[in-house]
Amino acid sequence: MARPKNKADLLNLSKKNVELLMDFIEGLSEEEQKSPFPKGTMNRNIGDVLMHLHHWHLMMIDWYGLGMKGEKPDMPAKGYTWKTTPALNSWIWEQYKNTPLEDAKKNFISSYEKVRSLIEIHSDEELFEKKRYKWTGTTSLGAYLISATSSHYDWAIKLIKKAKK
């Protein structure tokens, strides 16, 4: 499906990609789900990938909460810039690397549902009008939500499939 351009497409694609991701994971044996990825990837297993997604959900929720109150959120996170995202992702991995897989699954789904609820309360215009909110700069709220959901889940599916070849 093409990049979402309205609320319905964003809700549908994020849900579809969450389901594809979780169905793929659940289709693996327990041993495959828990086995490490080949060397050379920062996220070393499926739990790491899910916690990466979870943390980006939490950051999105934080940006949204601060931004909608008229504050300027630290994006992507305090002490990081978009150019230093690899260092931020490494920090995220360090924080969560020992999370049990079942906890990672629960955390991911829980934070996904919170982000989804943010999408649900907005109109197409509120989501996709560029420069509507000061905190989103020249882009739209929807663009941030796409990056935190459907696009990120697509990345996760590809990463896990590559690691499991």
Image (cartoon, rainbow, N blue to C red):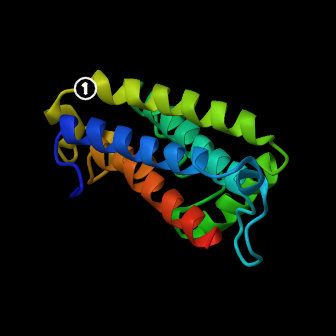
Q: Nearer the viewer, residue 80 or 59?
A: 59
**Which amino acid, by three-letter code, is at mark 1?**
His
Q: Residue furthest bottom?
A: 40
For residue 90, above or below residue 13: below
- In the picture of the structure, the residue carrying the numbered disc 1 is 122
Quarter of the image where the N terminus is located: bottom left
For residue 133, above or below residue 90: above
Q: Nearer the viewer, residue 58 or 41?
A: 41
138 lies left or right of 45: left
Q: Nearer the viewer, residue 41 or 162?
A: 162
- Image position, residue 27 (x, y; %): 57, 48
Can residue 77 be seen here? The reply is no
Residue 154's quadrant in the figure?
bottom left
Give me the residue at 80% from left, 54% from top: 94
Give me the residue at 31% from left, 50% from top: 143
38 lies left or right of 14: right
156 lies left or right of 128: right
- Image position, residue 8 (x, y; %): 19, 35
For residue 153, above or below residue 70: below
Give me the residue at 19% from left, 43% from top: 128
- Image position, residue 83 (x, y; %): 54, 70
Which element type, helix, strand or loop, lies under badge 1?
loop
- Using a 10 Å C-alpha cutoff, classify the residue at mark 1 as few (fewer than 14 neighbours), some (14 to 19) or many (20 or more): some
- Image position, residue 15 (x, y; %): 37, 38
Can residue 44 be seen here? The reply is yes
